[in-house]
Amino acid sequence: MSTITVSADINAPLEFVWKLFTLPEHIMRWNTASDDWETTSATNDLRNGGRFSFHMTAKDKSSSFDLGGQYDEVRPLRHISYSLEDNRRVSTTFFENKNVVTIVQSFDSETTHTEEQQHKGWQAILNSFKKYVESQL
């Protein structure tokens, strides 16, 4: 298992970025790697030991899956780390510099998809988040 890292620069204030990244009603609007998928439900207990669950569905209803896990560490406006249900670890760090927030996300790879596919998918989700945040300003 290796670690894959993706990142995005978002032109918005840190507090706004954090809110849209963590509140379920916003997660459902941006948490997708492509336009033919959607997140139909999201729960998020954002605290150390809290749990989260997102249900993702193909818009044509041909496929769906749940992504869930437990938070290991939450440092508001700075860092989130969690363990997925398959025990892979994910780390998300927020850096702010003059109203630009850089999000760096690193995660343990899985064995079903190539590392290139995983990088592309997670980067697409982060790009979707950037687009959503900047469209809300």
Image (cartoon, grey):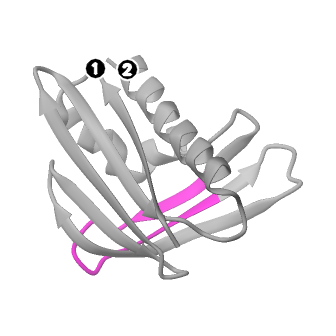
Mark 2 surroundings within 10 Å by alpha-carbon count, few (fewer than 14), some (14 through 19), many (20 or more): few
Residue 93 visible: yes
Q: Which residues are magenta?
A: 40-55
Task: Residue 119: give x, y in percent of width and height.
Answer: 56, 47
Q: Is residue 111 above or below residue 17?
A: below
Q: Nearer the viewer, residue 54 or 106?
A: 106
Residue 39 visible: no
* Residue visible at 27% across and 81% down in the picture: 49
Residue topped by disc 2: 134
Q: Is residue 102 above or below residue 113?
A: above
Residue topped by disc 1: 11
Which mark sits nearer the N-terminus, 1 or 2?
Answer: 1
Q: Reply yes or no: does residue 108 show up in magenta.
A: no
The image quadrant of residue 96 is: top left
- Give the overall secondary structure of the magenta segment: strand
Task: Residue 131: give x, y in percent of width and height.
Answer: 46, 24
Tell whether 121 sits left or right of 63. left
**Disc 1 element:** loop
The CA distance from mark 1 to mark 2 is 7 Å
For residue 45, the mark is none
Q: Nearer the viewer, residue 43 or 123?
A: 123
Task: Residue 92: give x, y in percent of width and height.
Answer: 31, 54
* Residue visible at 15% across and 51% down in the picture: 78
The amino acid sitting under disc 1 is: Asn
Determine contact: label 1, label 2, CB under 8 Å: yes
The amino acid sitting under disc 2 is: Glu
